[in-house]
Amino acid sequence: MDRIAIVGLGLIGRGWAIVFARAGHAVRTFDVDPAALERGLAAIDASLHDLDDLGLLDEPAAAIRARIGPAGSLAEAVGDADYVQESVAETLAAKHEIFAALDGLAPRQAVLASSTSTIPASAFSEGLAGRDRCLVAHPANPVHLIPVVELVPAPWTDAAVVERTRVLLEAAGQSPVVVRKEIQGFILNRLQAALMSEAINLWEGGYASADDIDRTVRDGLGLRWSFMGPLETFDLAAPGGVVESGARYGPPFAQIVASQAANAWSPATMTGLAAERETGQPRALLGERARWRDRRLMQLLAHKRAAAAREAARETR
Ligand SMILES: NC(=O)c1ccc[n+]([C@@H]2O[C@H](COP(=O)([O-])OP(=O)(O)OC[C@H]3O[C@@H](n4cnc5c(N)ncnc54)[C@H](O)[C@@H]3O)[C@@H](O)[C@H]2O)c1
């Protein structure tokens, strides 16, 4: 068991608290806003209840919840931590300030990880005495339902810190990906941005309705992508594997990519898209829709776990 500190108990911090407590660790949570701390703990209760409902917990929800405690100060949260997961606001100034404080307050051997989606660790850790124990551990939302976590070290991050984080997260049921060099958007958001930009281009160009574009992913590409990635998909796209797929589909794909402009995300396009989506999905129901999304993710996780267990049992037979 490790002592984990969660700093910032918003949308992301609360998911991390569940991940670590579910894995048996002692979790201290801190938020500068006491009301946010309360809200975060209440949201953790609701998520644990839903996870329990779908049989996704290995022990009673109350036993997991008992490992999560609030801290009255940052010093109390991180003073004896082995691992700190920072999830405060996404600005360089906020990351600078919190990492300077964490580097002063956390024990020297503690790992300091940031949930940042866009800011490389080199931008907020350079001047710190303990910069070698800082890295990005970028999760997806909701953290406790989508296991991927991108580990992105700065050039000076100790390789042993990356490895310790990888082992900790993997043992906690997450799926850590090591990004070997810093790059804007890391991997997840580079892939996501490319798809999102083209989806909006197609909608803007009048090629299909928003729902039909979404359907192409949810009833098409996404079905495969929930258990194999695009590169493995490409390997299976021709009898001769990726080399033959490249020969067959590379030239037309290169032409398509050359014809794709980066979308400008104009406010007018966003307003138009919102209006079309509003007809099928009233804005007032967004909160309910997020809860529905989480329950669907839980069912998908349950299915993936059961399918992996069946496969493993077949292999050992
Ligand atoms: N929301 C997402 O989809 C998502 C996905 C992956 C990563 N992230 C990253 O996770 C981080 C948190 O995002 P979020 O969506 O949870 O934001 P959020 O606004 O929901 O939560 C941030 C919380 O941090 C608290 N906070 C601010 N300054 C603090 C400080 N100095 N000390 C302690 N608490 C402080 C706030 O009171 C708030 O409760 C960001 O860096 C974001 O980029 C977000």
Image (tube, rainbow, N blue to C red):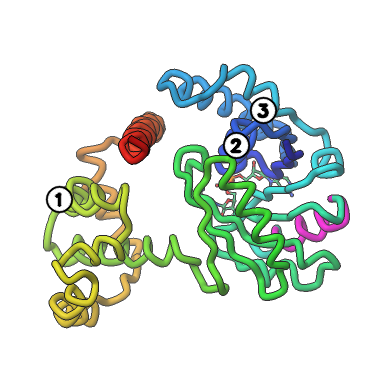
Is the C-beta of the residue carrying label 2 under 8 Å from the nearest atom of ligand 1?
yes
Residue 205 visible somewhere in the drawing: yes
Residue 289 visible somewhere in the drawing: no
Tell me residue 108's x, y (percent).
86, 56
Image point (62%, 17%), residue name: 62
Tell me residue 116's x, y (percent).
59, 57
Density class for disc 1 (Cα within 10 Å; few <14, some 14-19, many ≥20) is few
Does the magenta-highlighted stretch encompass residue 97? yes
Q: What is the spatial separation of the Cα atoms under label 3 and label 2, in whole angstroms?
A: 11 Å
Image point (67%, 75%), residue name: 155
Among the two numbered marks 3 and 2 on one chain, the one whose residue lies closer to the N terminus: 2
Tell me residue 305's x, y (percent).
39, 35
Residue type pointed to by label 1: Asp
Density class for disc 3 (Cα within 10 Å; few <14, some 14-19, many ≥20) is some
Please tell me whether mark 3 or mark 2 is closer to you in this view. 2
Question: Depth check: 94 or 162 in front?
Answer: 162
- The residues colored magenta run 95-106
Please tell me whether mark 2 or mark 1 is closer to you in this view. 2
Residue 212 bears which disc, if any? Answer: 1
The secondary structure type at the circle numbered 2 is helix
Q: Classify 45 as above or below 103.
A: above
Residue 14 bears which disc, if any? Answer: 2
Q: Is residue 22 left or right of residue 273?
A: right
**Mark 3 lies on residue:** 38
Q: Quadrant of residue 241?
A: bottom left
How many numbered marks appear?
A: 3
Question: Depth check: 131 or 313 in front?
Answer: 313
The secondary structure type at the circle numbered 1 is helix
Position of the N terminus, as image quadrant, is top right
Residue 200 bears which disc, if any? Answer: none
